[in-house]
Amino acid sequence: MPFQLFDTATRQVRELDLVHPGQVSIYHCGLTVQGPPHIGHIRKEVVFDVLRRWLEHSGLAVTIVANVTDIDDKILAKGVEQDRPWFAVAYENERALHAAYEVLGCIPPTYEPRATGVVPEMIEMMQTLIERGHAYAAVDGSGDVYFDVRSWPAYGELSNQKIDDMQAAEDAPPEGKRDARDFALWKGHKDSDPESASWPTPWGRGRPGWHLECSAMAAKYLGHEFDIHGGGLDLRFPHHENELAQSTAAGQKFARNWMHNAMLNLSGSKMSKSVGNTLLVSEVVKRVRPIDLRYYLAASHYRSIVEFSEESLTEAATAFARIEGFVRRAAELVGPGELGEIPADFAKAMDDDLAVPAALAVLQSVISDGNKLLGSGDSAAISVALASSRAMLDVLGLDPLSSTWDRRGDDAAYAQVIDSLVGGLLEQRQEARANKDFAAADRVRDQLTAAGIDIEDTPQGARWSVKGD
């Protein structure tokens, strides 16, 4: 079946209609870098990484753009709070975002523009909107520029709202607005703002509004019409609604499809930066293997709300351990081999609005059958099950034998030394057990455990791994 996706704008699952056959262009809203990413932020990155991997597996050429919002009220406030330049705050947290991408195995975006890099394009767009009668400079001389929502009858179409039912836009004071719902395209420079956080325009110095940034970046890197615009569901209004209005009012066709992932909640509420440090990606991966965290974030349907708990995270790690256990045991018997064929039912699930839970059910069925084969000695059948499992896991970014996750060979010299030392101790343990000296065998095991080595006894002998590897 052709790939189908739930389109937030039409509220229907429909076939992906591409601007250019064989090519997919995707823009999803990246982080406003006033702080490092928590696992709620990174769920979106994992969702779009899986989408990208599946589309590329399906033979499509994918261009994916994820912006960095590096100028914003909150970033300026953080700079004042920390007594640091605002751009130092932004850059530090941009690096933390990149580290989160890497630690969770996300492929970097094709392009990752910063908002501050497209100011000329924003000014051009504002001039176009003013000329077309859809924007205006504030009458109070503040240097603000606003989008006139009542000039655009379609305003509210993405979020299915009527203008008169909307609350006032909170991005700027109402004094310079024609209507309280008008939103800021540009914010005039204030004496309290650093001079470095402003650029010259025909309406005075200032800095961009949040919504204008994404419209300018999407147009610059993907053109005036592209295939998928996405992000977290909390961005549908006002951010994406405003993007859609200003871009189409400027004469662009903009996005053909809108894709929004649901939130990762904590105690029933959307996870936000106020949750503290314990749920930052950098902190969670200290107590949970990154591959287990990725499995946790990827396993639910992207449109399903995930209620976070430590228990559910532990359950996910246990579930993935069963999958990984088969892959590693099979690879020890028959070698890692190559990626194999993906079962038709797995492909059908992924083509049906990226239904990862249904796809995982297919994977788990293959794993279950593969486990039954491990003791059979049927190397050919084990190889087929392993190759198929790895192909499915590769699409999800979870193949434990891929170079992303199997880093034990990063330093071959140290790996060889450790393997030799652990192997020698395991031989001593085996000799002690053969002599029924179980106290000595237990001492060896305790020594290895204290050194951070996990031991698993299998019919083929003892296996070891580094804890957290």
Image (tube, rainbow, N blue to C red):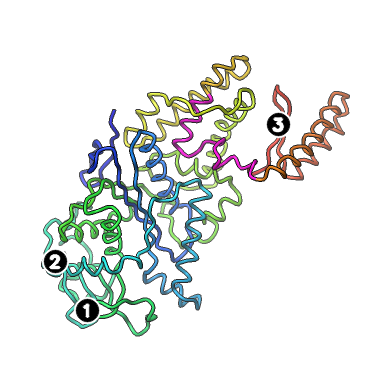
Q: Is residue 403 magenta?
A: yes
Tell me the quarter of the picture where residue 122 sits.
bottom left
Q: Position of residue 212 (x, y in %)?
A: 27, 64
Q: What residue sits 77% from the left and 34% below the top?
A: 423
Which segment did they paint magenta? 386-410
Please state if 277 lies on the left or on the right of 419 as rendered: left
Residue 145 image offset from top left, x and y in percent = 22, 73
> Which of the marked residues, 3 or 2, is nearer the chain's N terminus?
2
Q: Quadrant of residue 243?
A: bottom left
- The quadrant in which the C terminus is found is top right
Q: Secondary structure at mark 3?
A: strand
Q: Which residue is painted at 70% across and 23% down in the image? A: 460
Callout 3, which amino acid?
Arg
Q: Which residue is mark 3?
A: 463
Q: Nearer the viewer, residue 398 or 310?
A: 398
Q: Which numbered disc covers residue 134?
A: 2
Q: Residue 321: x percent and y percent? A: 58, 34
Residue with the mark numbered 1: 203
